[in-house]
């Protein structure tokens, strides 16, 4: 194997796929990435058995071949090379070392044969549709913060993508919840997704996909079945197993009778929460409660800490119903405010013990539910 490639192009491709590699693994080959040189392209592959990633770049292939090298070492070398420099790679005669030359630098990387490198089959993915990179990015961005990290409820450790209806119109919905908050985002059902039921895409896949979407331009081709999902764009491919479990009926936690409506400036609310929460900033998450006293055109936010002190602030709101006092986890409330892009946040409440619905007035496709805390 013998090839020459631009270091900047190579680094971009490596950065797309090396994130799935687990440095310490019982199978040594899984710490490596596969390098395949053929037909004027350099293809790079990595996997952790649950996610498979590949990308490719144009290269001057002097002699075709395939080998694997340590993903982390290869990445660390390439990112330190001068931007836009020419990298020349050759495999030694024994096939045990990949020799990298760039300017006056030379590296010898230990290699492994690729025979045992596992792949995830993608020939049985019958459901196929296309989303714009903007749509997919927004669906992920607006829901990923609510993914649960609790291992015992593994079925919540991802984003649930499924077909459903809203106002008698078929939609594709992304939902995530950790039991304390819920985030969902809707888009019109894309052509080809009519037979889709639902699948839970793991958090690791969601984060890796989101990381590479910044380099996407145009459409994302998606294909799936009940156990796997595949994303392709440009020369990049991500294939992932989905979580083998049943996402709970999240609609049961969505309140139906929240008749008290509060409208407020989202930035003002977020800044006020941030300020009053300063007195509990070093405490455990479970103690980061913020109390909201809601009365005519006025919202009073307060935080008390037995060891640190207290804080209180007032925010203007549009509200004319009866007085309500309710508590929330301040961090969870700020997380939701961070995902509201419009100027105005709309909060629907019923009483002090019922979940609140929080909406972005500028985006009807975005929907949040937040459970209250007893204070």
Image: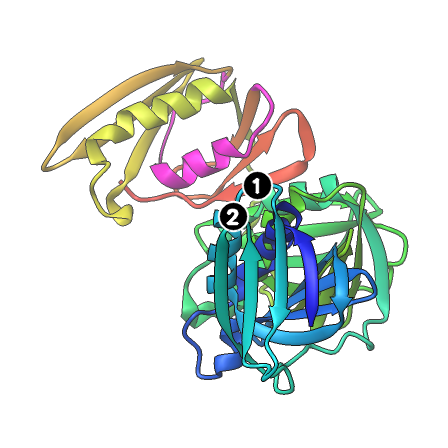
SS label for mark 2 = loop
Residue pointed to by mark 2: 81
| Frontmost residue, 22 versus 37 | 37
In the figure, is residue 3 to the left or right of 151?
right
Q: Is residue 251 above or below residue 364?
A: below
| Frontmost residue, 135 versus 165 | 135
The label on residue 39 is: none
Quadrant where the N terminus sits is: bottom right
Pointers 1 and 2 in contact (C-beta within 8 Å): yes
Residue pointed to by mark 1: 83
Part of the protein shown in magenta: 319-343
In the figure, is residue 131 to the left or right of 320?
right
Residue 47 visible, this angle:
yes
In the figure, is residue 284 to the left or right of 37?
left
Residue 322 located within the stretch drawn in magenta: yes
| Frontmost residue, 108 versus 158 | 108
| Frontmost residue, 59 versus 206 | 59
């Amino acid at each position: 194997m013998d090839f020459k490639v631009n270091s900047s192009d190579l680094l971009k491709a490596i950065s797309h796929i090396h994130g799935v590699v687990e440095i310490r693994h019982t199978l040594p080959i899984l710490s490596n990435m596969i390098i395949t040189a053929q037909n004027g392209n350099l293809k790079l592959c990595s996997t952790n058995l649950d996610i498979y990633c590949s990308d490719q770049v144009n290269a001057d292939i002097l002699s075709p071949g395939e080998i694997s090298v340590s993903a982390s070492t290869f990445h660390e070398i390439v990112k330190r090379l001068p931007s836009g420099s020419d990298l020349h790679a050759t495999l030694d005669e024994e096939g045990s070392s990949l020799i990298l030359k760039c300017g006056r630098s030379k590296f010898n990387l230990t290699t492994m044969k690729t025979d045992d490198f596992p792949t995830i089959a993608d020939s049985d993915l019958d459901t196929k549709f296309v989303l714009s990179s903007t749509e997919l990015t927004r669906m992920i961005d607006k829901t990923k913060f609510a993914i649960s990290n609790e291992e015992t409820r593994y079925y919540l450790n991802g984003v649930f993508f499924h077909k459903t209806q809203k106002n008698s119109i078929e939609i594709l919905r992304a939902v995530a919840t950790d039991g304390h908050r819920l985030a969902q985002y809707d888009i019109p059902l894309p052509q080809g997704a009519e037979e889709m039921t639902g699948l839970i895409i793991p958090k690791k896949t969601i984060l890796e996909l989101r990381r590479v979407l910044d380099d996407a331009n145009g459409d994302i081709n998606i294909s799936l079945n009940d156990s796997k999902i595949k994303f392709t764009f440009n020369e990049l491919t991500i294939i992932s197993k989905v979580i083998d479990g049943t996402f709970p009926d999240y609609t049961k936690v969505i309140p139906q009778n929240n008749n008290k409506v509060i409208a407020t400036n989202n930035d003002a609310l977020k800044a006020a929460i941030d300020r009053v929460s300063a007195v509990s900033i070093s405490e455990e998450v479970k103690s980061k409660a913020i109390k909201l006293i809601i009365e005519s055109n006025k919202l009073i936010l307060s935080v008390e800490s037995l060891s640190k002190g207290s804080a209180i602030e007032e925010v203007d709101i549009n509200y004319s119903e009866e007085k309500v006092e309710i508590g929330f986890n301040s961090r969870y409330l700020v997380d939701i405010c961070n995902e509201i892009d419009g100027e105005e946040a709309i909060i629907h409440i019923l009483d002090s013990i019922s979940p609140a619905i929080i909406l972005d007035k500028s985006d009807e496709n975005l929907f949040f539910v937040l459970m209250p805390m007893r204070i």
